């Protein structure tokens, strides 16, 4: 493949001290050393508790950090416990590193297609994968002070590193130290789960927890699971030069998303070189001097040699070792059970984030944590069911959604009208060469009340926020249609949907009245 050169950092690692390696901190370069100094300092001394805490928070991912910072900001005495790296999946092995890799892959794709815009790249595209990953680590380290132990200590929070375990309904043990609490919050998150695939346990495979430690591009990458993580990384690695096979047991990709939207993303991924093996059957992993991916797809058998295997098929809650049984906190394979107030089956213990939510997104964890603060500290009645939750898969194009899908509306007995605006009729999308997507909005039949929307576009994750705002505050398509949008922008597609709705109000009766009025005033 042609290659894009990404400059390497000007660094001399010979002068850098070698650090003790924690999970997800390979290679031990200056950027990962900076990351560790911030989110798990090796010389950190846990404080000595003095009296009872208003809140003990277990887990320093997004849910835990937001809970701890918010509670402390309101004057609560807070303890925060983390066994690994503060920042959780989002900073260390999720949102931040994945988007760093995706941004490099988008640049590679843009240069590869530069000729379509009349821009010549005589030397072709040369991908320096090690340089791209070094850039990701540098930027992750730059972001890490936001989640650092020092910052949270300066917020007045007692930060403890170690494994937490409930002793009773008012006590948590961390490294032999007992922390007494009035309320506790479980925010331990989730991890990649390994499905039962013959031969899988006999090979070294990657998950999102180890993928971002790579420094060399695998020539041939197999990806199992065409959900958001699998699709994002399959496309990114293909754009960076790998031969990628993506295996999915269901038909197509992103099986939970709008099928028209997922189909557009699939076309782009296949154009980028991703080989999709969907409706996969008889999947197994073999060893023959390397890794072999064996699967049947649409009646055809495949036996492909690969260099690395990425597992992106499911998550498991981090409940082990917490001693939840002793404090009456119920959980199952999906996580800790909570009610709509984020309260567990023990009324003194709450949970937030991936450990208890079907929405395993950073922004979901953030807003669940805000509910926990109000309910746990102030006997509030805030409910998670009131949240309007958008999400986005950061492929190219992006696919974003909020509210109900058409099928869900039907299941709930909600009759809907659907409005679609394709980007091929939006000037800015045409000029940007990004006219392959659409905005689709469902409204309650006969009204402009929005119940759901899907956007597939270059910046779908940004565009969906306007519709989320409208749904949250009861603004319908009529109001959107009367809101001025700057021209030319791709957001104009949403305004055009408002125009579509307003035209439906021009019934034959209203048209007849208008004609009579205009004839009379002529």
Image: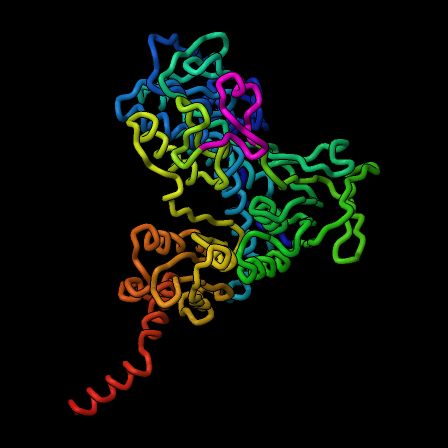
Closer to us: 497 or 416? 416
The furthest residue to the left: 521
Q: Which residue sits at x=38%, y=34%?
A: 341
Q: Is residue 6 magenta?
A: no
Image location of residue 139, percent across then percent down: 46, 36
Q: Quadrant of the C terminus?
A: bottom left
What residue is at 80 percent from the left and 39 percent from the top? 286
Q: Is residue 6 left or right of residue 365?
A: right
Q: Position of residue 105 (x, y in %)?
A: 55, 49
Q: Position of residue 400 (x, y in %)?
A: 47, 53
Looking at the rendering, the stretch of residues picked out in magenta corresponds to 317-338
125 with respect to 493 (left or right): right
Q: State the residue in front, 23 or 225.
A: 225
Q: Is residue 314 above or below residue 161?
A: below
Q: Residue at x 64, y 45 (%)?
A: 225
Outermost residue to the front: 413
């Amino acid at each position: 493949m042609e290659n894009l050169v990404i400059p390497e950092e000007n660094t001399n690692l010979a002068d850098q001290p070698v650090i003790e390696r924690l999970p997800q901190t390979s290679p031990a370069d200056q950027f990962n050393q900076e990351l560790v100094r911030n989110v798990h300092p090796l010389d950190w001394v846990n404080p000595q508790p003095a009296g009872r805490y208003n809140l003990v928070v277990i887990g320093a991912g997004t849910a835990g950090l937001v809970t701890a910072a918010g509670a402390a900001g309101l004057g609560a005495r807070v303890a925060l416990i983390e066994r690994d790296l503060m920042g959780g999946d989002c900073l260390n092995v999720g949102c931040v590193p994945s988007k760093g890799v995706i941004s490099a892959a988008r640049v590679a794709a843009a240069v590869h297609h530069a000729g379509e815009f009349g821009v010549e790249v005589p030397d072709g595209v040369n991908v320096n994968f090690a340089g791209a990953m070094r850039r990701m680590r540098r930027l992750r380290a730059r972001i890490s002070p936001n989640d650092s132990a020092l910052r949270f200590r300066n917020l007045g929070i007692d930060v403890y590193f170690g494994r937490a375990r409930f002793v009773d309904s008012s006590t948590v043990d961390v490294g032999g130290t007992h922390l007494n609490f009035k309320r506790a919050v479980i925010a331990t998150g989730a991890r990649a789960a390994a499905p039962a695939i013959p031969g899988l346990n006999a090979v070294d495979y990657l998950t999102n927890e180890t993928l971002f430690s790579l420094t060399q591009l695998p020539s041939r990458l197999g990806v199992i699971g065409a959900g958001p993580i699998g699709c994002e990384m399959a496309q990114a690695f293909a754009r960076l030069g790998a031969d990628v096979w993506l295996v999915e047991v269901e038909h197509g990709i992103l099986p939970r998303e709008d099928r028209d939207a997922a189909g557009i993303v699939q076309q782009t991924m296949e154009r980028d070189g991703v080989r999709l093996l969907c409706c996969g059957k008889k999947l197994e992993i073999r060893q023959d001097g390397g890794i072999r991916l064996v699967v049947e797809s649409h009646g055809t058998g495949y036996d492909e040699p690969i260099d690395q295997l990425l597992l992106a098929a499911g998550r498991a809650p981090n409940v082990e070792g917490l001693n939840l049984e002793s404090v009456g906190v119920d959980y199952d394979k999906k996580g800790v059970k909570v009610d709509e107030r984020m309260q567990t089956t023990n009324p003194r213990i709450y949970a937030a984030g991936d450990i208890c939510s079907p929405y395993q997104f950073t922004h979901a964890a953030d807003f669940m944590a805000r509910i926990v603060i109000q309910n746990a500290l102030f006997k509030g009645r805030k409910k998670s069911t009131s949240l309007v939750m958008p999400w986005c898969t950061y492929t190219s194009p992006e696919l974003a959604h909020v509210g109900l899908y058409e099928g869900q509306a039907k299941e709930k007995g909600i009759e809907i009208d659907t409005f679609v605006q394709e980007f091929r009729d939006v000037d800015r999308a045409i000029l940007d060469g990004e006219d392959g997507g659409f905005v689709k909005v469902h409204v309650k039949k006969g009204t402009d009340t929005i119940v759901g929307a899907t956007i597939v576009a270059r910046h779908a994750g940004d565009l969906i926020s306007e519709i989320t705002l409208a749904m949250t505050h009861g603004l319908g398509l009529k109001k959107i249609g009367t809101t001025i949008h700057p021209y030319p922008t791709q957001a104009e597609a949403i305004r055009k949907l408002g125009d579509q709705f307003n035209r439906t109000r021009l019934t034959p009766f209203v048209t007849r009245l208008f004609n009579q009025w205009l004839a009379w005033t002529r």
